[in-house]
Image (cartoon, rainbow, N blue to C red):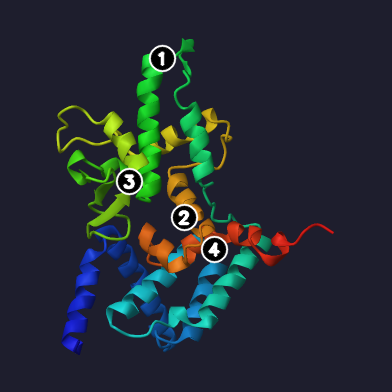
Amino acid sequence: MDIGELTQLSETMHTRKRPKTRSAYEGAWRRFRRWCAARDFETDDPFVVGLYLIGRYEAGLSLATLSMDRNAIRYHHDMGIQPSPTEHVIVKNVLAGLRGRAREDGRPQPRQARGITAERFRRIRETAHKPRKQGSGLESEERARRRAALEVALIAVMRDAMLRRGEAVALRWSDVAFRPDGTAWVVVRESKTSAEPAVQHIRKGAADAVRLIMPEDPDPRARVFGYTTPASVTKRIKRACAAAGLGEKGYSGHSPRVGMAQDLAANGAALPAVMVAGRWQSPEMPARYARKLRADRSAVAALPED
């Protein structure tokens, strides 16, 4: 592959980013370049990137904003087919140090959703059909059955396909393909990080759950789950978790995706495999999701009590 082909590939990857993501990265990159130009600094120096992130932190910017800054700098170096200074140990240590300072300073920490793991999903399936409070009474058994089928299908597909909330909302019947072996494929037309479609596998259990809610002659353009906003997906998942006795705090629309990442890690999947399954472009989030699992599987955790 020559330099022309590499450049073309880089431009293709650029167009696969969602316009909103590209716009955010371009704004962050312009700010970084202006900051460097004012000080006669080079944009490809890891010391400079570290100083920039420290300055942003001291100016009151959040850890999430600093992470986005780093991603934008890395993205623009990748676009130019150049080594990114953000991968240098200096930058990694700066960010680790800033996270520690943020805890000491009492700054809000990025919250991790509690994962709906296989065990928690089992509890949801066992309790979803039970009538819940509706107004001054309870749901009818038929209404509870239909609601339970929708909740189970939603969470099963979001777990297996590792869907984000918006991706679940956007899923249409034309995006679901049932396979002869009982499994299915779902097409993610556009994601948070890419405008390029992705095909995700769902296992037989999830495919069966989708069949239960599928109309006899579904409109290909109709939404599979019927929800129109990501917030409605979050609300439904929280209610299902509370009804299953999993608690009301910590669960969100990201919980199925987080739970599957934790299950994959617990099953021995390597971090790159988890990144591919969840379509993550950075190892930071899946590594964070698996962090507690790594502690539970450490040599000390396996040591018998004294």
The answer to whether mark 1 and mark 4 are in CB contact below 8 A is no
Q: Which residue is mark 2?
A: 261
Q: Quadrant of residue 81?
A: bottom left
Q: Amino acid at mark 2?
A: Ala
In the depicted view, which residue is nearer to us: 235 or 30? 235
Q: Which residue is mark 1?
A: 141
Toward the front, the furthest residue is: 181
Residue at image location 49% in from the left, 77% down from the top: 52
Q: Earlier in the sequence, mark 1 or mark 4?
A: 4
Q: Earlier in the sequence, mark 1 or mark 3?
A: 1
Packing grade of label 1 (10 A; few <14, some 14-19, many >=20) is few
Residue at image location 37% in from the left, 66% down from the top: 281
Q: Earlier in the sequence, mark 4 or mark 3?
A: 4
Q: Earlier in the sequence, mark 2 or mark 1?
A: 1
**Dot in front, 1 or 4:** 1
Marks 2 and 4, how far apart in space? 32 Å
Residue at image location 54% in from the left, 52% down from the top: 111
Q: Amino acid at mark 4?
A: Gly
Q: Is any part of residue 31 visible from this angle? A: no
